Amino acid sequence: AQSLIDYVNRHKTANSLLTFDRTYTKGARKLPDNPGTFRAIINYHERDPFPVREGAHWCDHVALYAPRRTPEWERWIAIDGNAMTQEGFAEFVEDNIRDIAEPTGAQMLALALDFQARTDSRFGRALNLGNGSVQLDYVEAVQGGDAKGQMVVPTNIKLGLRPFVGGDAYAIPARFRYRVSGGSLTFTVILDRPDLIEETALEQALTAITAGTELPAIRGTVLPAVQPAKPA
């Protein structure tokens, strides 16, 4: 966003115009490929041209800023709502430990590695502890019989991520869910309205750009209505 602000401030005129076109999709879990586009039309039409032909401009000096998602945000979006095996979950946490804020990344990694080490264990009853955690009972085959144990799993986690390159980081809540089937466990991370996270980031970028350029902003796509007459 800052690069757009710097460019506009170098070239803007009294008639320059800023537009913001936000892309929406149906459903909170499906995000558009292009979140939105900021467009600065440097040589826009004059406000009250008279005569019209003298106040109209080509509107062809345009600066664009299309925010790009960060690789870390895209990785979490990719697993959002998708079940992972014990081993797959452990590998994902190990690769993305720096993104986890609560519980700490170290705590989640220890939990993930513990699950990875118990891929042969049979999981059974779950007890809600009433403090944001669930206690899972498991049975592990050992020499001479079975050994019973318990593991405590959080039901909610919090991530610290920058949705867009060069943008601010946000605390992103997520639900942490598990499912026991046939004694095996799968885990699912469900981001809390990722569409609203992106909308907040884009709105803050719009506020920063309008303040930094001191240009009026219009939502949507603006096309030049009048072109100047070509010389005879």
Image (cartoon, rainbow, N blue to C red):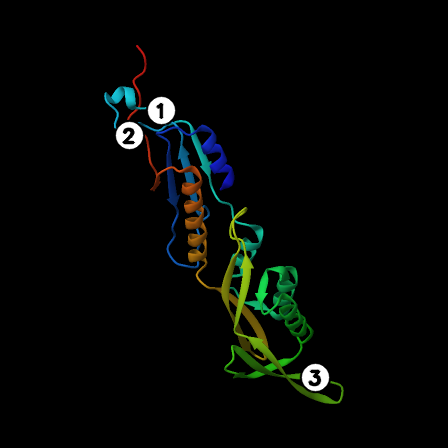
| Label 2 residue SS | loop
Q: Distance between the residues labelled 1 and 2?
A: 14 Å
User: Where is 7 relative to 211, above or below?
Assistant: above
| Label 3 residue SS | strand
Residue 192 percent coordinates (x, y):
46, 64
Q: Earlier in the sequence, mark 3 or mark 2?
A: 2
Q: Is residue 85 left or right of residue 55?
A: right
From the image, state whether disc 3 or disc 2 is nearer to you.
2
Q: Residue 181 carries which label?
A: none
Residue 83 percent coordinates (x, y):
54, 67
Q: Residue 58 carries which label?
A: 1
Q: Is residue 20 left or right of residue 96?
A: left
Q: Distance between the residues labelled 3 and 1?
A: 77 Å
Furthest-bottom residue in this view: 144
**Nearer to us in this view, 26 or 130:** 130
| Label 1 residue SS | loop
User: Where is 135 relative to 1, above or below?
Assistant: below
Residue 81 percent coordinates (x, y):
49, 64
The residue carrying mark 3 is 141
Residue 225 percent coordinates (x, y):
28, 29
Furthest-top residue in this view: 232
Amino acid found under the numbered disc labelled 3: Ala
